[in-house]
Image (cartoon, helix red, strand yellow):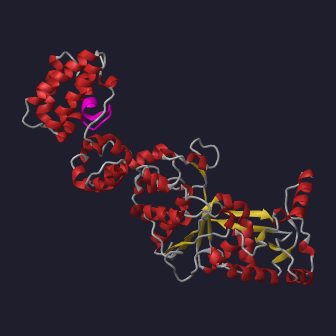
Amino acid sequence: MSSPARVRFAPSPTGRLHIGGARTALYDYLLARQTGGKFVIRIEDTDRMRFVPGAEAEIYAALSWLGMEWDEGPDIGGPYAPYRQSERTEIYLEHAKMLVDSDHAYYCFCTAERLATVRKEQQARKQAPRYDGLCRRLSPEEALDRKNAGESHVIRFKTPRQGKTTGIDAIRGEITVENASLDDYILLKSDGLPVYHLAAMVDDHLMEITHVLRTSEWLPTFPLHVLIYEAFDWEQPAWVHMSVLLNPSGKGKLSKRHGSGGAHAIYPIELKEAGYMPEAVVNWLALMGWSYDDRTEFFSMSDLIGKFSLAKLNASPAAVNFSKLDHFNGLHIRSLSEEDLASRLVPHFYAAEIEVTVAQLRPIVPLIQERSRTLDEAVEMSGFFFRDAVQPDPQQLIGKNMSPAESAAALARSIEVIQGFDRLDTESLELSLRKLSGDLDLKVGQLFGILRVAVTGQRVSPPLIETMEILGKELVLERLKQATELLESSK
């Protein structure tokens, strides 16, 4: 593309921002940055019944965390303000009236009870439910009189009864439908608020949006949107209907029941809290519906800006793969400098009620950087470094194929060896403990397994010998003695 793109991400504050919305925002952002265009945030908040307090703030927080800064929006303004639809109602009323005046829309006075009766009768005849066009047949004069008399009404689009409507989708090409299959959709509700079909089309035109990216769920009403643009005689944007995200099983659209926290969280803010890095989440999201080639999988944001293209979007639905997220998170953790990783770990240690500084974390980073899939996992793996004491499970202190007494004796001999050091250093300590395992007629894994649980309180930890060197002779001896006493008291 040679010209700057103006794209908008237009979420509704009716719930939390999930990864499907974040992916749409990402593709918008990449297209805007790649072309030197503008990334616009517009809040579509006309559905007041489903409005959720705090949802808009979470949208901003999630996008900021993911590294997608916007150029225009409700919080920062811009040349096309206001950017909340609830503040633009007069604009929609004006455009709805324009459609009525041009005979592309009409006032409908049918009550909810009548519409329910019509729908029930259609279902009995095995017909697709749709508006039967009663008010479409009213003369303009009668309709205006009833409207001016204060009779409750909506405004419906006057869909052509004959012919076909064709829209061009950037992924699927031409999409053509018979107009006879379309309904006379409501554009303006009886409370004067617009529905999406009117508000979004008007805003996209007035805000000079060049590309509309949304999922294929909007394809059923795509012809209506084309017809609205044609009714106003506006130039249409490039329509891009992306693939939907499926549940991890590959069956059914991704549902919010999978958003239960941790690796199965579907909300960016929860992924942040669970220790995922924004770079990894962006990498993961980008590849759910787009690919650069069949080999490259590691992307930074700058890589994506340079390589993203609409032509390589895939129309096929993509199953969400949380294992791939773990994989990408591990890759991005390993790509960090040790100083950067240490600084990112600090808030996660604090969340685990462990107060540490970057300087304190710096020595352990080399031990955990290659082994951690998430920042939270790094805390779980290495929190013992900063606790006054550990609480090993007595059963885990018993070596493989050993008795409690034999395990306690192995700990006692290990204490004797370590007491002989002025200070612990990795090379000498490992040689001495390996020799001890031979002297005790134990496999190295048996002895090191006991020592690992005694020193760290857990079976999985960073490399044992390097861990002991960082903890220091005094603390290692203290923990080994406590573990010995624990074994002896549990006999």
* Residue 356 location (% of width, % of height): 27, 51
Residue 55: percent from the left, percent from the top? 56, 63
Q: Is residue 111 above or below residue 139?
A: above
Let me know if residue 336 appears in the view. Answer: no
Which quarter shows the C terminus?
A: top left
Q: Residue furthest front?
A: 489
Does the magenta-highlighted stretch encompass residue 119? no
Query: Which residue occupies 13% across, 32% down?
Result: 429
Counting labels gives 0
Q: Classify residue 243 by image quadrant.
A: bottom right
Q: What residue appears at the point 14 percent right and 36 percent down from the top-left corner?
A: 473
Task: From the viewer's side, name the closer residue of 317 and 204.
Answer: 204
Q: Nearer the viewer, residue 464 or 26?
A: 464
User: Quarter of the image holding residue 208?
Assistant: bottom right
| Magenta residues (range) | 452-463
Q: Is residue 320 visible?
A: yes
Residue at image x 68%, y 78%?
Answer: 89
The image shows residue 156 at horizontal and vertical percentages of 81, 72
Report x, y in % for residue 367.
25, 43
Q: Nearer the viewer, residue 204 or 287?
A: 204
Q: Is residue 433 left or right of residue 263?
A: left
**Up/down of 298 relative to 94, above or below:** above
